[in-house]
Amino acid sequence: MMKYLLFALTLVAALAPGQFAGASPDLTATTAPAGSIWLDTLDLSKIEQDWGKPGKCQSVENHPLTLGKTVYAHGIGTHARSIMRIDLHGSATHFDAVVGVDDEVGKRGSVTFEVLADKKNVFETQVVRGGDAPVPVSVDLTGVQSLSLIVDDGRDGIDSDHADWAGALLTLAADAGNRPQMVPSPQNAPGPADPPRMAFEPVSPLPAIHGASVVGSTPGKPFLFLIPATGDAPLTYSVTKLPAGLVLDPKTGILSGRLKSSGVTVVKVTVKNARGSATRNLRIIGGTGKLAQTPPMGWNSWNVWAGKITQDKVEAAADAMVNSGLAAHGYQYVNIDDTWEGQRDAQGRVTSNAKFPDMTGLANYVHQKGLKIGIYSSPGPQTCARYEGSYQHEELDAQTYADWGFDYLKYDWCSYGDVVKGQSGPDVFKKPYAVMGKALAKASRDIVFSFCQYGMGEVWTWGESLGGNCWRTTGDINDSWPSLRKIYQSQNGHEAYAGPGHWNDPDMLVVGQVGWGRPHPSHLSPNEQLLHMSLWCLLSSPLLIGCDMSNLDDFTKALLTNDEALDINQDPLGKPAGRIAMDGDVEVWARPLADGTWAVGLVNPLLEATDGTLQLSALKLKGAQPIRDLWLHKDLGEISGSYTVSVPAHGIVLLKVGKPR
Ligand code: GAL
């Protein structure tokens, strides 16, 4: 604030007398004063923000832009963190607006606003919270080439950060030749639609086993695991030495029952068809706290359907997971996100709403296919979409989910911010997850516990200690390059905190038909999608498909079912990649694998193809080493010293390097 005051004083001192003297424009007006334009007349699709879409003359949730009960006919409703860049080329002389947290979130939300003129900070606020008085902005832009309007999250995550640039007005220079233009930053421009750097492999008719090779379950609680396998039908399954309490259906490959005791059993699984057979070990671990030994693979409803999810659509998703072949490659969770919730009954038990008439029937439907089902709630009184949350009903909710048959809970911070308003410190972030963690441990089913609080309080450093099986490390992803780039680059360093049973979650996949209720083909370019999938495999991220699985084009299917990439994600060593080196602009991400080899991604964030080099010394490998390209499905022979390859624009080359033990 001090900085802002000083700046304002300097500015006033530097101005010719009278320059500010004119009556300040009426920012609530419907028509712009002569010689000025509303900022919302520019191309808002260039705005980058961490949640939702920018509202043109509306809040981010499409309500009238309202600050301190004043409604503004013009302005932009955005969400932290966001950035707008405007090329002015000297065409404007002044910027005016009123900023604050939109009234639609009440007392929630906390943000800072900043204005940069040619990269110089010319305005900034202290943290502005929901319900605080709006702050006027008035800055001189004479001669300025480039203007940036930035909203940050007030250092406490982006929950409810609905930030308005209300009445945002640019006064144009008398001789303005150019019109101001909203632009993406060069590093955020979308990648070219070059053909994806991959070879399409026909599905082999021979039997092959995929997915997790290690699964854990609590003795006495229901166990369910579909052995993922491909090959010409019919396939038959057999196993040696199952631990007590489990049975195998030889026709479907579904293992079920309840483990009788703790301990590790290595089971030899064989899958046969008319063409041959495949055998692989499956390690079954009995014990408490043994879930998610490998990152969960499955689907979640949010990125494709958002609030339009229904019971029918979840059943269709389970059908599609099997019929499209995805389940045969290891995808197994079918997860409902927000908006299933109804009211609580007289006993306080949560019910589902009219879109979900029969939760038990739905869970049974999914289980019969050998798949598992997930549900969503919030530690706050309300979820992010303002449905019933679990606040003060945690134990009852956990048992209700178990009674219905749910296997996975995504637990989303949302309105819990209201409960702890004004409080700070790591314990504030931990408490609600500790409460639900205990409730889930008591429940009569194994339920994978997925924290969703966008990385607040460095959740990766303590998520495991509270029983978290995975935790979101970022705000919401969307199908744009800026979102993907920001998220993957922010993961470096988190790898130290993840391992079997507890994973970093940089959010769900945005490939295929996505669209939060209005499905469209992902706006990511084909190579961006390859980069997304490959990095999520390298990072041991949960692989939750965010698209309509009943509408998969060949590319998306190939992208989601490359067993060589999926094997990296599911590698039983469970050591996620970090960025181990830079080769100019090319990032080298790498992780060790259980068989003694390395998985390596050479990542090119540039807008043009460029050469990337892997130095074997970065992997501490010496002498000649075998190398394989996992998207071209090609052995490249042996390399010594280093390997150089052309990496597509916004693309990746995914390699396996070294001699297996
Ligand atoms: C967000 C969460 C999204 C989705 C949404 C539902 O906070 O990050 O992934 O769950 O809430 O309202």
Image (tube, rainbow, N blue to C red):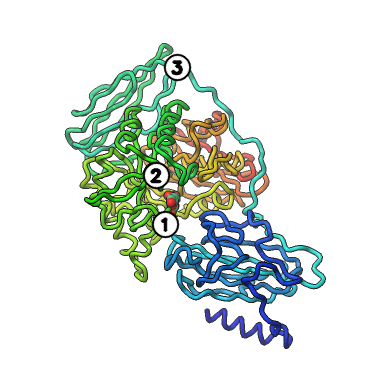
Write down the residue under mark 2: 575
Image quadrant containing the C terminus: top left
Q: Looking at this view, name the residue that lies furthest to the top.
A: 274
Asked if the residues shown at circle 2 and circle 3 are in contact, with their CB atoms under 8 angstroms apart, the answer is: no
x and y, in percent, of residue 405 in the image: 28, 38
Q: Which of labels 2 and 3 is toward the front?
A: 3
Name the residue located 66 percent from the left edge and 48 percent from the top edge: 607
**In the image, is residue 553 above or below residue 15?**
above
- Residue 184 appears at what percent x and percent y? 65, 56
Residue in front for this viewpoint, 191 or 520: 520
Residue 233 appears at what percent x and percent y? 42, 16
Residue linked to disc 3: 232
Q: What element carries label 1?
A: loop
Of the pair 37 and 484, the residue shown nearer to us = 37
Question: Could you tell me if the residues under marks 2 and 1 are in contact, i.e. CB atoms within 8 Å?
Answer: no
Which element type, helix, strand or loop, lies under badge 2? loop
- Residue sitting nearer the eye, 641 or 124: 124
> Callout 1, which amino acid?
Gly
Left or right of residue 433: residue 155: right
Q: Residues within 10 Å of mark 2 (few under 14, many from 20)?
A: many
Above or below, 258 against 7 in this view is: above
Mark closest to the chain's N terminus, 2 or 1: 1
Kindly indicate the quadrant of the structure image that contains residue 243. top left
Q: Earlier in the sequence, mark 3 or mark 1?
A: 3
Instruction: Find the distance from the CA under tag 3 to the CA under tag 1.
Output: 44 Å
Q: Residues within 10 Å of mark 1 (few under 14, many from 20)?
A: many
Q: What residue type is labelled 2?
A: Lys
Q: Residue lying farthest left?
A: 260
**Numbered tag placed on residue 455 in the rendering:** 1
Q: Distance between the residues labelled 2 and 3?
A: 33 Å
Q: Upstream in the sequence, badge 2 or badge 3? A: 3
